[in-house]
Amino acid sequence: MLSSDNISLKEREVFGIDHPAAGGNFLENALLPEEIVCSVRYHHKPSMCTRYRETSSVISLAEALSRSFFPKIEDDGIWTEEHDAIVLELSLDEGKLKKVREKAGEEAATMQELFTL
């Protein structure tokens, strides 16, 4: 499996743009708020986000946690050292992460239903 950096490199090689940039451009053209645009554009590198860094960090962490709770080949939410830093920055200890994991497990069917509409 490719790492998120390798996926982005492959996307740029094949399409000339990676999915964070493409998603950010799409949302910007759709006139969504800058906070959402930035969060999508920097969801793999939230430390590079100069504005709305906390929101971008939360989105990045959510993607990585999603993969750890519900592993799937088609996603790219690979856990990185940046996620470790986000966990520390947001004061998320193992107990809090366990509660998030439990809640995600309880809501898994509802979340799956949402994405199959």
Image (cartoon, rainbow, N blue to C red):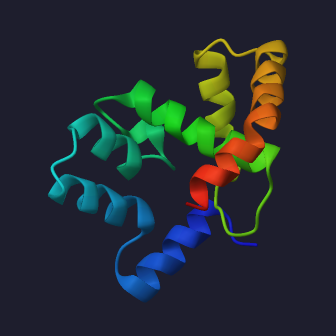
- Residue 56 screen position, x and y as percent: 43, 36
Q: Quadrant of the N terminus?
A: bottom right
- Residue 75 screen position, x and y as percent: 65, 62
- Residue 43 screen position, x and y as percent: 47, 46
Q: Nearer the viewer, residue 10 or 36?
A: 36
Q: Quadrant of the C terminus?
A: bottom right
Q: Residue at the location (22% across, 39% down)?
A: 34
- Quarter of the figure with residue 84: top right
- Asked whether, in this view, residue 58 is left or right of residue 39, the answer is right
With respect to residue 115, does 99 lie above or below?
above
Q: Nearer the viewer, residue 22 or 48?
A: 22
With respect to residue 68, does 91 lie above or below?
above
- Residue 68 screen position, x and y as percent: 79, 45
- Asked whether, in this view, residue 101 is left or right of residue 66, the answer is right
Q: Is residue 80 visible?
A: no
With respect to residue 95, does 65 lie above or below?
below
Q: Residue placed farthest to the bottom in the image?
A: 14
Q: Residue at the location (61% across, 62% down)?
A: 116
Q: Residue at the location (70% across, 16% down)?
A: 92
Q: Is residue 115 visible?
A: yes
Q: Nearer the viewer, residue 93 or 115?
A: 115
- Asked whether, in this view, residue 19 is left or right of residue 64, the answer is left
Q: How many numbered marks does the figure carry?
A: 0
